[in-house]
Amino acid sequence: MQSVSSARFVTPVLTQRKRELLNELLGQFAQSVNFCIQKCLEHKLTSRASLHHAAYGEWKSRIDLATHWFHSAGRVATQTLRSWRKLCRQGQADPNRPPVYEARTMRLELWGDKNSTGICRFKGDTIQIRVRKGEYLWLPLIVTEHHERMYLSDWREGKTNVGEVTISTFKDRANDYVPFKREIEPKRVEGVCGIDINERSVDLCILKPDEQPKHIKLDTSKLAAIAHSMELKQKSIQEKLDAPPQRPVQKRRLKAKYSRRRRNRTSQILHVVSKQIAEILVVEKVEPVFEDLMDIRQSMRSKRKSENGQALRKDMRRRLDQWPFRKLQFYVGYKTLQRERETHYLPREQVRGTSSTCPMCGRKNRPNGHVFSCKACGFVGDRHFVGAYNTAVRWWTKDVGSDVPPEWRQMQPPAEVAVPPAKLEVEAQKIPVQAGVQFDTEF
Ligand SMILES: [Zn+2]
């Protein structure tokens, strides 16, 4: 198992010569990727090896760069095509319009002892890029204490390895994203923890053999409050700036400012909540299981279009569209991986009915508000807890392949541990946004 965390480095302002060279490289990289995409489609190729065989000679005669640039560009091209083909299969992309690589970024393979086909080298405080034989571009990096502590010290000790470096420009500087990979030996766990994400709370259900289910509710109602207040604010901006005189520049700037603010505040709360969850998982010695929400928005959107499908109310749809389910899953995922535990996803076909199936007798019920009550056996409990419980049980019986232990059925009343709402105290270096969330409603 591998844990990857990426660090962003910025270079000092580059000299004009370096800037020009970098821009030239970015242009040629995009050109090479598009060349490779075209060749793959022409010859119906999918692998890098066959691409090399078919197109290398022509590439070399067109572009004056070290050979290994072709490998990096080919890698990006084959990956782009793979995801495009997938989207075509799902009906989300047009099979007659092949992808075009327009990004002003390049992803470069490393060269070193293990890999001789790379074109760049990470040296801790510089990145060396091989341009042509004997010609290099050196990008010095601004290394902060945070980089040193979070990434570089482990890298120097050989605990992590660097992956493909992504480079783009940023005003007169270069932006470098460097992934640090760490091999992880998964810790032994005692059970699973189903996680049900809702608008106002995140509910955990911890299931361990020989123990009764445990319910933990984390309050995330602040997120809904932020969403609400920001919506009001955006509406008021809209109204004020729609009135004459027209001020398009100001409008765009203000809109960008408030959506950035909203994103920062939301992310901070998500970081706090996910850290809390990760720590609970460590204490309880369990691994998290989520419902696979990968394309929840997609499925909602198609529901919206279909005529016989039940259409969601417009405001409800907007709320769900903006509620960052996936982001929270992602944060919990990497924070638990840092704590040497794996995250599982319940496959989509098993997600159906997790919040409407009775945990005691397995009968389907129509959920009513936040309370789940079973008409068949009389079980009454928190609806979100039931969702988390079913997620955990379904994963357990599928993965571990055993029956549900009888003690898991004993939960009347469900053991409930109250947890105070998430406190907004996070280490400043980890999350570069202002601490403390306040609502200023006047605009
Ligand atoms: Zn029941």
Image (cartoon, rainbow, N blue to C red):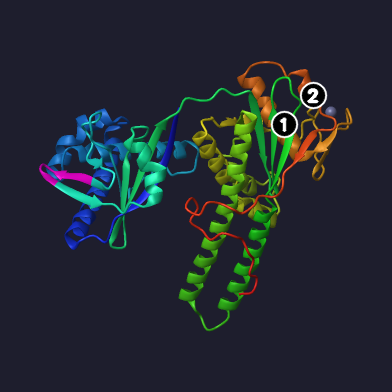
Which residues lie in the magenta part? 128-135
- Secondary structure at badge 1 equals helix
- Is 442 covered by the magenta stretch? no
Residue 76: x %, y % from top left: 32, 40
Q: Is residue 417 left or right of residue 164?
A: right
Looking at the picture, which amino acid does disc 1 mark?
Tyr
Ligand 1 has an atom within 8 Å of the beta carbon of the residue at disc 1: no
Which residue sits furthest bottom? 245
Q: Going from the N terminus, do you reach mark 2 or mark 1 first?
A: 1
Main SS category, magenta section: strand
Q: Write down the residue under mark 1.
A: 389
Name above or below for residue 316 compared with residue 438.
Answer: above
Residue 355 placed where, x, y %? 74, 36
Identify the residue at image location x=63%, y=36%: 280
| Image-quadrant location for residue 300 | top right
- For this view, does 291 lie left or right of residue 165? right
* Position above or below: 374 against 431: above
Bin the neighbour count of mark 1 within 10 Å (Cα to Cα): few under 14, some 14-19, many 20 and up.
Answer: many
Q: Quadrant of ligand 1?
A: top right
Q: Nearer the viewer, residue 368 or 428?
A: 428
User: In the image, is residue 84 above or below residue 443?
Assistant: above
Q: Which residue is mark 2?
A: 409
Q: Could one spot residue 355 in this view of the protein? A: no
Q: Is residue 140 left or right of residue 161?
A: left
